[in-house]
Structure formats: C-alpha cells, structure tokens
Image (cartoon, rainbow, N blue to C red):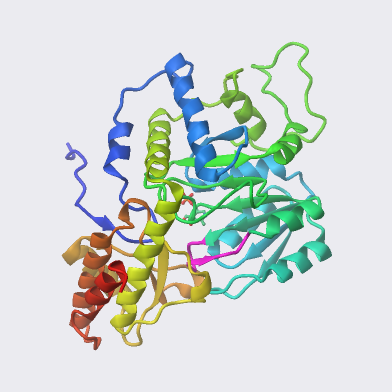
Amino acid sequence: MVSAIDPPPRLLMGPGPINADPRVLKAMSAPLLGQFDPQFREYMKEVSELYRGVFQTRNRWTLLIDGTARAGIEAALVSLIEPGDRVLVPVFGRFGHLKAEIAKRCGAEVRAVDAEWGTVFAPEALEKAIKEFKPRLVAVSHGDTSTTMAQPLAELGGLCRKADAILYVDATATLGGMDVPADAWQLDVVSAGLQKCLGGPSGSAPLTLNERAEKRINRRKHVEQGLRGKDEPQGEGEIIRSNYFDLAMIMDYWSEKALNHHTEATSMLYAAHECGRILLEEGLPKAFARHALASKALTAGLAAMGLELFGDQRHKMPNVTGVVIPQGIDGEKVRRALLADFDIEIGTSFGALRGRIWRIGTMGYNAREDAVLVTLAALETVLSQEHFKLPRGAGVEAARAAHRGR
Ligand SMILES: Cc1ncc(COP(=O)(O)O)c(C=O)c1O
C-alpha cells in the first residue's frame, strides 16, 4: 500500500499555485451536500453575491465554472464565438497565445497582434487594430503571468462598445491582487481562477458576464434534449460547440430554475466561497495595497542584491515579479536548491523566456512580509553558493525598509 498523502511544507512563491489560506482548506473539508439541497443552493447564491463584490459588478450572471482558470476561458470563448467570427487577440505573453489557440478551436477567424514580451499595448495600438479588423470579440489577458506584465484596460471596454465587439478579459493572474472593476471598465465577460491572488487551490473559475454577453449567448441556447420542456423554444443561433462549457445551460443551472447540467464541484464551491469571504472581509483596497507593498519590498530586495528586474516596470503586476537570471548562473540549479534546502518554490517562464527569467509570486495568502523576507534570504544564500557576488544581507534589509515605508 502507498502511504497517505503527506506533502512537504513548501512555501509556494512561484506564479501560482500559491499556498491556500488555511481557512479555505478548512472550508473544503466541510461535509458534502446534494446540488439541489436548499442549503447548497443558498451557498451558490452567496457565491454569486460574493463574486459580484470581487469583480465589482452588478451582473446577475456571476458564477463558477468547474475546472481550472482555463475552463473559464474556454467557457467564455466557446459560448461567445460562432464559427467564422472575427476575434482579435492582443498577445503580450503566453496566455495571449492560449486565447488565440482556443478561439481558433472555436472556429474563429483570429487576428493576433503582438507586443514584445515584457511590454504591453498602448491603447491607440488596440484602437487601431479594432478599427482595421472589426472583430466581433476581443479576448485579452489583464495580467500575463508569463511576462509579469499587466495590460491597462480602462479604455478598451469603451472602444469595444463603439465597435460593437464583446470584450472578454482573462483576469486569472490579477483578480484579488489588482483593481479589475468589471462594470466601471465596461468589461463584458471576465474570468479567473482561485490559485493566485484569491488564495485558494486551482479547480474553480469564477466568471461574470453582463447583459450584452448574455444576449449573444442565449441566442444560441439549445437545452439538452433530456432536460428540455416539450415546446421549449430553442435559440436561432448556431449551437454552442461544447456541452460542458455551454454558458447558456450553465446560467440555467445557476438560476432559480436550477435546471440540471453538471454536478457542481461541491468542495471547490466551498473553497471559492471562503476565498470571496476572506477577500471582501479584508476589503479590496487593502488587499490591493498589500499586494503592492509585497511587490515593492520584493523588488527593493532583489535590486539591493544586484539582480535585474524583467520587463517594463511601469506595467509590472504587483503580484508576480520577473527576475533576469544573471549571466553564468544556472537558473534551474538555483530553483532546485531553493526547493531542496529551503522548501521554497519559485518559477521559471515559458517560450523565449524559459531559463532567462525567474518568476517570484507574492500573491493572495503569500503576499506577506515574512514570505518575502524568507524568500530573499534563501535566494541570497543559494546565489552566494553559486558564486554570484552580492552584498550579504542587503536584500532582506532593503525589503524590511520598504515594508516600514523607508
Ligand atoms: C493569465 C492566465 N490565464 C490562464 C491561466 C491558466 O490557468 P489554469 O492553469 O488554472 O487553467 C493562467 C495560469 O497560470 C494564467 O496565468
């Protein structure tokens, strides 16, 4: 017999997952309920209300997609894109490519516009691309975890409305750590995952959609035959090409109708519920300030150690920091030593950035002073062992000073 799972006590300081808040793990161990139990339906309603607060929206349809953050992306794109639709994807990192790929799988005519990794788009560049291509949908990352950059989005919603395009935003990396006011920024659909700034495990994707998006989706509503009422009218639009990610049916499931679809992932819903409660108890402004402070302390510490930060720092997400791996240093060896000797995980990146940068996350439950200090101290020790010349103690000292506001 294999032993029971008993993981080592890692400090997860990579780009996600991070250590879940212990309150979330406790919530997940609550007894299961049936999905149509009145108490469970009450929890579902509470989740919708909590995430209206998190997304800063009044959208009726604020719910969970069962699956990791990518499930939220797929549900949004497959439900919104009809084959042949023009979809514009601004790509400034790996997760832009992911959305372009999913859109292609949905049968879209995709135009990907590129910004160099480590930079973001000027609003004028996006405006020009929208005017030229006339997309029906724009799909963009708010923060691209692969490059650590955050795309300014305040103006994009207005541009999409003018062009009659729906705007989908992947806020997986930023929700809970940065301001993502869905209504104020006119974001039509936004989705995320729990495992980053929301402080939970991966496996549930909060999603919100407004009436513009609802109209497009419900035009294509085809209720499963085994559930459909006798003369229930079907949408005139083309059927949504995924059953599991069919937002029209998922809305019915989350509505008062409680029309059966999947079996809601009970323990993940408990997790999302507690993540939402923790965040709103702290208050969004305080949570954003905590992430910003952790980033300030971490970057001050890294700079004091003589390390170079990656990308345009004016657009860096506060919750993930890219660090250029110094010449002559084996980045993977450093990561292995951090894990083996200090139980600390940090990340590398993807594509052209693989082996060129490390990514250190300060998100959710781990956006804390002690987590930053321990990570800096461990990195300093490992880099010294690798003969990287640095002033011993300077990183931790600079981070402490940043925390004290000096
Ligand atoms: C911006 C962004 N989008 C999507 C994803 C995919 O999330 P998941 O691995 O939970 O499916 C990630 C994961 O890191 C991400 O950072």
One can see residue 143 in this view: yes
Q: Nearer the viewer, residue 105 or 66?
A: 66
Q: Is residue 33 above or below residue 89?
A: above
Q: Nearer the viewer, residue 328 or 380?
A: 380
Q: Is 280 displayed left or right of 81 in the figure?
A: left
Quarter residue 79 falls in: top right
Q: Position of residue 235 (x, y in %)?
A: 78, 28
Point 33% across, 57% down: residue: 367
Q: Is residue 16 above or below residue 322?
A: above
* Outermost residue to the top: 230
Quarter residue 128 falls in: bottom right
Q: Position of residue 44 (x, y in %)?
A: 48, 26
Tell me the quadrant of the picture where the N terminus can be found.
top left
Q: Nearer the viewer, residue 351 or 253?
A: 253
Point 38% across, 66% down: residue: 295
Point 27% across, 76% down: residue: 398
Segment tinted magenta in the rendering: 144-153
Quarter residue 276 falls in: top left
Point 76% across, 44% down: residue: 82
Q: Is 377 displayed left or right of 202 in the figure?
A: left
